[in-house]
Amino acid sequence: MKARIRSLIFCLVLSICYLMPVSAHAHKVNIYAYAEDGMIHSESYFVDGTKCKNSLIEVFDERAGTRLLEGKTDENGKFSFKIPKVTSLKLVLHASMGHQNEYTLSEDEVREAMGEGQRPQGARQSKETKTGKETSKSSSQPERVSTKSRGKMDREVTDIGRGMSESEMEALMERVIDRKLKPVIGMLVKLRENNEKPGFTEIVGGIGYIVGLMGVAMYLKRRFKERN
Amino acid sequence: MHISEGVLSAPVLMAGALLTVGGTALGLKKMNYERIPEVAVLSSAFFVASLIHVPVGPSSAHLILNGLVGLLLGWMAFPSILVALALQALLFQFGGFTTLGVNTFNMAAPAIIAYYLFNLPVRKGNHLLSIISGFAAGAIGVGMGALLVALTLVSTGESFFNVAKLVVVVHLPVMVIEGIITAFCVVFLKRVKPEILEVRG
């Protein structure tokens, strides 16, 4: 009986040793980053919400593995920089004394932010369009003069007020809201992905539950035996 | 092999629950004091084996080990697998609590079948017969499990027929791999600790 218990304990200890991770980080530290308007903004904080001040952040090209740039976080744990290269970027945070974590931005996110960064050209195109509109406006000026000559001031005021139609306003607002919500949606998706994978902690917890149930069952069986 | 909640119809769920209650009661009756650690260790093995997923094409596959559990435990496979599946539903939302009965029966019934088919050859046979029986037990555990899952889905509705066929086809390679692993386990146990495989009433 004792030999069996010894062998069981030995097996458990051995399996736990084999399951032990090779490397372990100290306290957990978090980094999150998002891309916007040709820039990448990152925020770093410890588990209890404390900001990582004056911590080193390195930016790598995830595919090639080369380091593109590095910087320090400010008093609010933030570090922002211009996009150095349109590729998937890996941000590695080195907080003090071995705290470390990393975050990866996919190439699609980076390219999309760069696309937004090319707005000046887009603005020029829209200006050209406006120029065309001005031409059409100048062609319609005689009509307005005739309207003025009629003496109807209300129409002119109404036309001035309707600079933008309702559908245009809706489209503009939707565009702005989509852009602002994209980092939040990305974060939610990643949280869901992380939750779906069984973590090492839960697996060991499950085994612990089974061992606990074993103890309860042995206790009940022994008591049942004694009553008989 | 985890059928999620909301998929099966009520009669199928109730039938699975009743069968699992019966099997678990019989298993608990046969469970004596000395063998409780064995049940716990095999429950842990089943628990962990189902969580290590290997990506295979569009989906992923994992070991089941119900053939091995059946060979070593017999009817005690029912409480063993029930505990493992309950913890998976609780911690990882694999399967669900309403489908716990069906999932347990689909996994434990093949274990009992493997036990009755290959118990004597594994324990009393020679080396080669032990290997063949171990392989067959593992393969039958997975194969019968897949068939029972397919039967459960088809019983719920005709629309699950294609899914049922897919379940069976996907688990054919898993049968081979699990058979090999179960055979290795049986041979290892016969060498290292043959009293585990002694014939017991």
Image: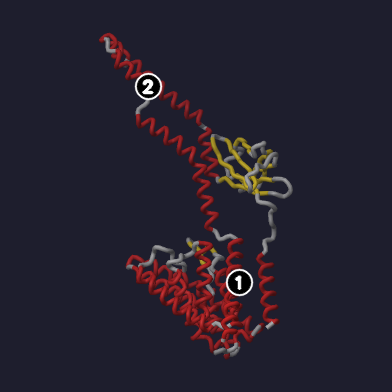
Pointer 1 residue:
A211
Q: Tell me the SS state at disc 1.
A: helix
In the image, B200 versus B125, the foreground residue is B200
Quarter the C terminus of chain A occupies: bottom right
The secondary element bearing badge 2 is classed as helix
Check whether the beta carbons of the residues at disc 2 and disc 1 lie within 8 A of each other: no
Q: Earlier in the sequence, mark 2 or mark 1?
A: 2
| Residue B124: percent from left, percent from top | 57, 91
**Please, which residue is most extreme toward the front here?**
A227
Residue at 64% across, 37% down: A76
A178 vs B129, nearest the viewer: A178
Which amino acid type is shown beneath numbered disc 2?
Answer: Lys
Q: Is residue A7 above or below residue A116?
A: below
Residue A64 seen from this side: no
Q: Amino acid at mark 1?
A: Val
Q: Toward the viewer: B154 or A126?
A: B154
Q: How many marks?
A: 2
Give the vertical position of A114 relative to B138 (above or below).
above
Q: Quadrant of residue A222?
A: bottom right
Q: Give the side of residue A10 with respect to residue A35, left or right.
A: right
At horizontal 61% and vertical 74% (from top left) the residue drawn is A215
Chain to which the residue tagged by mark 2 belongs: A
In the rendered view, does A214 fall on the left or right side of A98? Answer: left
Please name the residue that numbered disc 2 is placed on: A133
For the question of whether residue A82 can be seen, the reply is: yes
Could you say where residue B149 lies in the image, as x and y percent from the top left? 42, 71
Q: For label 1, count other residues whose C-alpha is less than 10 Å away and answer few (under 14), some (14-19) or many (20+).
A: some
Q: CA distance from mark 2 to mark 1?
A: 78 Å
| Residue depicted at 61% across the width and 68% down the height | A208
Q: Quadrant of the N terminus of chain A?
A: bottom right
Image coords of residue B6 (percent x, y): 39, 63
